[in-house]
Image (cartoon, rainbow, N blue to C red):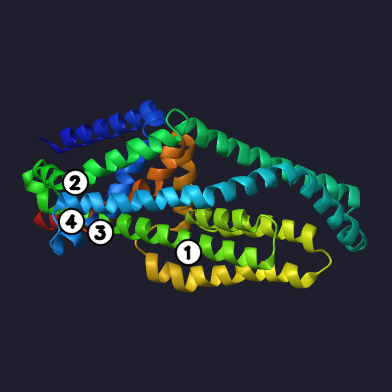
Amino acid sequence: MTLRRQLQFWALSLIAFIAFLMVFSQVLLPFVAGMAVAYLLDPVCDRLEKLGMNRLWATLTILLVFVALLVLFFILVLPVLGNQLAGFLQKLPELVNKLQGLVSSNIGERLTHMTGFKVDDLQSSMGDIIKQGASWIGELLKSVWSGGQALLSVLSLFVITPVVAFYLLLDWDNMVARIDSWLPRPHVDEIRGLAREMDGAVAGFVRGQVSVCVLLGLFYAIGLALTGLNFGLLIGIGAGLISFIPFVGASLGFIVSMGVALVQFWPDWTMIAAVGLVFAVGQFLEGNVFQPKLVGESTGLHPVVLMFALFAFGYLFGFVGMLIAVPAAAMIGVLARFALRQYLASPLYTGTGRISAASEE
């Protein structure tokens, strides 16, 4: 097969894969979640096999523990979060009005004196910002919901996802060997090397980032709860879970928590500063402890690229797109670096082909 035919084959395969995702994105959520669970737990299953447990019992043990922990979370934590979320949404207009009045009465006069910016203009600007933020969040939630609403239910996530994860985890090594047997023999070593590089990038980031999100969510939730902040558990866990988007989780959690703290604790600056200190310590731990130890530079991708991938895939494929955004970006990054290495070693970059041709003439 000529190079042109190969490029055509892979381009058509990529187009078919993207079309498949777009057509079936509304029913893929439990299957993609099952694949993610199997991928995350495969190293644990391999470790149990090395300890003498056969694959079937290792798979059953891991999935039973995983499902039990998930059920405990939904039974013990989810009701509390649901109540806080309902209360937060109910009091949100009141919180916004109080925050506007607080900022206008305490900062408006100084701002007017220093800049000539009127209090009414400040209130109007704050209202516009809040409306724009609410509209953006609404569009994001709408996109996420529309991408997974067909099977976004407790039944699908608690029944289909564990079943998919069980069969994939049980047959994981056989599937990898079968796919390996399909590789074109002349390029098998090169493809295996790229696959190992992709696996290292995806596994290192996903497994590490899941740990970082959980640890940050626990830290923020406990820290905000200890300060006595209203809805502290909800804000803390939410900020931790959104931390897989670089800078967004901490920034959004800080803004929301400081707004609630100003309304709740004003004029007690000590408690307001304590809320800010929770996020300052959290950012220090994330940047100097959690990220270097658990994630490192595993993906080789710039944070801006990761943010773009999350928003782009989320816009195109909904919630399923957000699940596959980071692995897909990491794989594309590996292929891009491979293409760059090939280019830097080619006569197109070095010009050696032209030099040799000229010498022959």
Is there CB contact under 8 Å for labels 1 and 2?
Answer: no
Residue 44's disc is 3
Q: Which of 329/216 is in front?
A: 216
Query: Which amino acid type is shown beneath numbered disc 1?
Result: Leu
Residue contact at pointers 1 and 3, CB within 8 angstroms:
no
Front-most of residues 300 and 168: 168
Asked if labels 2 and 4 touch by Cβ distance under 8 angstroms, the answer is: no
Front tag of 4 and 1: 1
Q: Earlier in the sequence, mark 4 or mark 1?
A: 4
**Which mark is drawn over residue 193?**
4
| Kind of residue at disc 2 | Leu
Report, in whole angstroms, how far the alpha carbon at label 1 lies from the one at label 2: 29 Å
Q: Report x, y in % for residue 100.
A: 83, 51
In the shown orientation, is residue 50 left or right of residue 235? left
Give the mark nearest the N terminus, 2 or 3.
3
Judge whether 330 appears above or below 32 on screen.
below
Could you tell me the amino acid type at mark 4?
Gly
What numbered label is drawn on residue 170? 2
Question: Relative to residue 361, is residue 309 drawn left or right?
Answer: right
Can residue 349 be spotted in the picture? Answer: no
Task: Give the mark nearest the N terminus, 4 or 2.
Answer: 2
Observer-side mark, 4 or 2, equals 2
Q: Residue furthest left?
A: 185
The part of the image, by quadrant, that contains residue 261 is bottom right
Query: What is the quadrant of the N terminus in the image?
Result: top left
Residue 63 in the image: x percent, y percent? Answer: 29, 49
> Which residue is at a point 29% across and 55% down the rendered structure image?
337
Among numbered discs 1 and 2, the one appearing first in the sequence: 2
